[in-house]
Image (cartoon, rainbow, N blue to C red):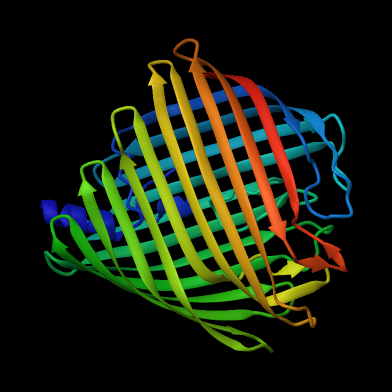
Amino acid sequence: MKKLAFLLLAGVPTMVSAQGLFDIAPNDEAIEDVRLNFTTGVRLGYDSNTSPSSSVVEEQDSTYVSAYIGASSVSISTRNTLEFYANYSANYYDESPVGGDDLTNNFSGGVNYVYRFNERVRFSSRTHLGYELEPDYNYGLANTRAIEEYFFYSSDNSFGYKFSDRIGAYFGLAVSGVLYGDDVSRSDVGTITPYTQFRYQYSPRTVLTAGYRASFGSRDTDRDSTSHIVTVGAEQRISATAVAVIRAGVQFYDVDGGESSTSPFFEAAYRASLSESTSFRAFAKYEISDYDTAFGAQSYDVNNNYRMGIAVTHRLRENVTLNSGLNVIFSDYEQSSDGLSDEDSLQYNLFIGMNYKLSPDLYLDATVNHTIANSDVTAGGVLVRDYDRTRASVGVSYSF
């Protein structure tokens, strides 16, 4: 029974609060019911560069105020596990960003669901939606602040089946995409990805994997793509509180009207509770990406994209928690359909924050977020994505 439970746990996407790149590692955190919980608060902040997009735009700083509310819950029964989460914030800037509005809206939310037909078969669904101005670097859809809010979506649905005590598989379909407003042209992308993965439980702690996925991308640039990825990998339960995943293989990439490409493919994730007070997460991924290939009226067929992220949470005292992290994004752009030379960009995003618990339901928080972007990519002869930016904020929140 223990082998069966572990194989299905590792074989099917499990319950998480989001579908970011951290979460290719199995995550069994949702083990008990959590009643519907609300959090509301207000935050005051400072932004050193409200329009970090083009070298011709003079840096403009501004103070801002943000009001937000969020809700989440987890419900677990013998056959079903259902998780829900939603967050909304309204942000008002004292000085309007260049080309943007002084008031912006941000929403993110999702539903995760698992249905266990029996000990051998289960269905898993994870759906996440977002309508935001700032990029969430852990998703891999957007790299920089847009002029106006953009909508992104991701839904991953799969059936897992256990053939024997050691052999299992899952078969799924994932869809994802990003939709920008009228002020951002030629950047909308949607992908449909059927996939399968076969799994062999080599030992009680180790699962070996072999997978295949096909991805069909639709771009506003009329340069639709087809991708085939073949991988082998392993998932290692290092301890009761640590798990690592690695997958490596080859990607065959083709663009309508363009050239075919072959590239290595790699993704890895690690999650661990280093102690009772410290947790650590990390991911790394390299692929040819359908996203982030257009710069105004110009575009590239290929974005060789590498992403890395780490996040650390440490409970300093019973009522004080620190969190910090780093994201690195490198893009190598090739095969421009508009006659552009090959270019690249490198972006770092570092954050640190503190949460202070005043009472069981009342919290103070402070965060600092610093971004450094270096790029030789141009759009219309103008250098883009070459900037520094610092955001700092303090806030108070209440949970009920």
Q: Would residue 75 be found to the left or right of residue 136 on screen?
A: left
Can residue 119 be seen here? The reply is no
Q: Relative to 305, is 179 on the left or the right?
A: right
In the image, 224 versus 249, the foreground residue is 249
Please provide percent x and percent y for residue 133.
Answer: 72, 46
Note whether 147 is above or below 175 in the view shown: above
Residue 148 in view here: yes
Q: Residue at x 56, y 62 (%)?
A: 176
> Residue at coordinates 67% horizontally, 53% vertically from top-left?
151
The residue sitting at the top extreme is: 359
Instruction: Count up the numbered dots.
Output: 0
Residue at 49 percent across and 71 percent down: it is 193
Query: From the viewer's perspective, is residue 5 above or below residue 234?
Result: above
Q: Is residue 54 left or right of residue 141?
A: right
Query: Vertical placement of 167 versus 244: above or below?
Result: below
Percent position (x, y) of residue 104? Answer: 77, 39
Side of 230 relative to 40 (left or right): left
Percent x, y of residue 28: 30, 44
Above/below status of 44 relative to 169: above
Who's the residue at 45% across and 19% down the image?
A: 320
Q: Position of residue 395 (x, y in %)?
A: 63, 21
